[in-house]
Image (spheres, helix red, strand yellow):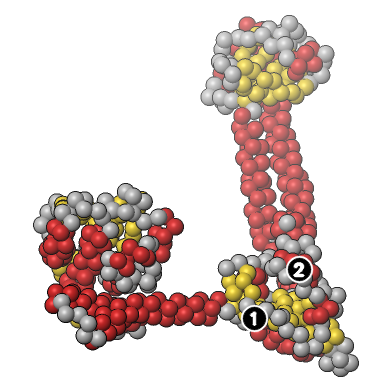
Amino acid sequence: MIKKKIARSIKTKLIFLYLTLVFIVMIIVGTYILTSIKKFELEKINREMINYADYIDEQIINSFGDAKDFQSGITNIFYGSKNNMQCNILNLNGSTIASSVLPYENYNNKAVIKALTGRENFSYCHEVLSGKKIKIWYDYARPSKFCDDYLIFIRVDSKEFLDIVFNMTLVLIFSLILALIFGGAIGFLFAGSLTKPIRILSDKAKEMANGNLNHEIIINSDDEIGELTLSFNEMAKKLSNMINKIALENNKLEIILQNMNDGVIFFDANGNVLHYNYASENLLGLDFYKIKKNDFDNVMQKIGLENNNFVDCKKKNFLFTDDILKINDKYLALNFIPYEEIKNKELKGVLLVIQDVSKHKKLDDMRQEFVANVSHEIRTPLTTIKAYSETLLSGEINNKELENNFLNIINQETDRIYILAKDLLELSKFDNNQAQFDFRKINLCEVINKSIEQNNIEAKKKEQEIKFEQAKDFYYVNGDFNRLNQVFCNLISNAIKYSDEKKKIEIYIKETERYIRVFVKDNGYGIPKEDLNNIFERFYRVDKARSRAMGGTGLGLSIVKKIIEAHDANINVISELNVGTTMILKFKKFVEQENNSGRKKIE
C-alpha cells in the first residue's frame, strides 16, 4: 500500500520525468560522442594503413620488381615498426611472398577476396588463438598499382582501438550514472520545492478530517496553492468552533460513563442497546460485540430476567423488585430508569444502572457468620459453666470427688473461653496491622525442637512418635522465634489431635539455593479435597463435632497463616482422606545484608 502511494505521488512522477530526460539526453550525447570517437580513430587507422600500402607499393613492388627481393625490402623498411601491424605482399593465390612477420601465412579472408576482384577493402577478422582466446584483426587489402600480379595486405591488431572504444564506453556509462545521481538529487530538491506545499496541505487536510482543526497551515506563497491554503484555514476555524462544542458535551458524557464503577446500559424507545460502558459488560459477563441481537429482551434473557417487561421498565419511577440479583457469582442491584427528551418530554428509552454489591454482601455474610460462630463458641462453654455452677450452688452435691470434677469442668470451659478471646484478640491485631514481631536470625531446628518438646507429653499420652529428620543442625531464616514456635506448636498439636494412637508424626526439612521447606506430616484422618481451600478460614472445621470434642476453636490455622505471611513465607497443605496430611512451610533463606533485626510492626 505504501509502495503504491509513493509510486502515485506527484513528487515521484516529477523525479522520474526529470531522470528520464537526463537519461535520454545522456544516451544521445554519449552515443554521438562514442560514434564520433570511433569514427575518428577508425579513419586514422585507415589513413595509416593506406599510407603503408602506398609506401610498400612504391618502395618495394615498383622499386625492386623481382619478388625474390620483396622480403629483404620489407624487412629493411619495417624493422623496428609497430608490433601491432603486419605488412604482407601476396600473390593472386593469397600466398605470402613477403611479410613483416614470420613465418609466412596464406590469407583468404574477406579483405583479400575482395582485393582479388580489383577493389580495396577494410574488414575485421577474428582469429582463435590457444584455448578460447580470440584476437580481432583489422585488415586492409588492395591490388598493387604497379603490378596486377600482387596484392598488398596490411592488418592491425584492433585491441588498442577496441580498448579505446571500451574505455570511452565505460567513461560514458560512469558519466551517465553520475548524471543520474546528481540529476536525481537535483530533481528531488526541485520536485520537493514544488510538492512540499501540496504535501503540507494534504497532511493538514487529513488532520482536519480526523478532527484536528486547531493548527493553521502556514502560507508561504501567493499563488493558487496559497489561496487554497487560506481557504482551508478559514474553513478549519469555523469547523473547529462547531465541533468543539459538540465534542465537549460528548466527551463529558463518555468520560463519566467509562469511568463509572457502576454499569450503565441505554436502551432506545424500541428496546435496542444504544450505548453501554465497560463496567456493564464486566458486571453482567456479556460481550455486546458478540451478541447478534442487542435488544432489551435478549439482554434480559442473557442475565436470567426473561420475564421482565420493557413496557413496564419505560414507566416512570419503575424499580426492579428484587433487592439483590446474583449473576456470575456477583451480587448486583439493578435499577431501570426511563429517560425522555428535554424539550417535548417524549420518552426515548430506558437507562439500566447496575451496581456491584458483592463486597457489601460478602462483608455482611461474613459479619453474620462471624457473630454466629463467636456466639456459638462462647455459648457452648457458658452453658456448661452455668449448668455445673447452678448444680454446685444448689448444695445437692455431697460427694467431694464429684464436686472437684464439676469444678475442673468449669475451669476447662473457662480456659476455652479465655483461649477463644485470646485468639480473637490476636486476629484483631493482625487485621488492624498492630501485631508486633521481633525479627532476627534464628535457627529453624531450634524452633522445631522446642515445639516438639512442648507437645511431647500429649504425644506420649497417645503413644505417638514425633520424628524430626534434619540433614544438618542449622537452617537459618529471618524471623520471630516465639511466633514461629507458635506456628509449629499449632501444626504439631493438630497432627497429634487428628491422628490415632501409636501413629508417627514426621517432620523434615528440604532446602534449595534460596528456600527452606519444612514438612509436618501425620498419618491421621486426612482432609477431603473440597475442604482443602477453606481450612485457613476462621472458625472453619472439617468435622465440627470432632474438632469441638478435641477443644479446637477453629482459629488456630488462621493465626498460623497470618504469622507465616508476615514472615514473607507461605504455607500449603497436601492431604488424602484416611491417609494423612502434610503441611508445607516455605521460607526464604537468611541473607546477612537483608537482616533487619529488632521489633517491627507489620504494616
Which residue, given by chain and number where applicable, does mark 1 sit on? 323
* In the image, residue 532 above or below residue 371: above
Q: Tell me, yes or no, if residue 508 can be seen here.
A: no
> SS class of the residue under badge 1?
loop
Residue at 19 percent across and 69 percent down: it is 485
As displayed, is residue 397 above or below residue 171?
below
Q: Secondary structure at mark 2?
A: loop
Q: Nearer the viewer, residue 130 or 96?
A: 130
Q: Amino acid at mark 2?
A: Glu
What is the quadrant of the C terminus in the image?
Answer: bottom left
Q: Alpha-carbon neighbours of circle 1 within 10 Å: few (<14), some, or many (≥20)?
A: few
Residue underneath mark 2: 306
Is residue 523 shown left or right of residue 18?
left
- Residue 598 found in image quarter: bottom left
Mark 2 or mark 1: name the one nearer the start of the chain. Answer: 2
Give residue 69's position: percent from left, percent from top. Answer: 62, 9
Residues 318 and 101: in front is 318
Quadrant location, the N terminus: bottom right
Vertical placement of 171 versus 3: above or below? above
Query: Which residue: 60% across, 67% down?
Result: 328
Determine the CA span between mark 2 and mark 1: 17 Å
Discs 2, 1 touching: Cβ within 8 Å: no
Q: Amino acid at mark 1?
A: Asp
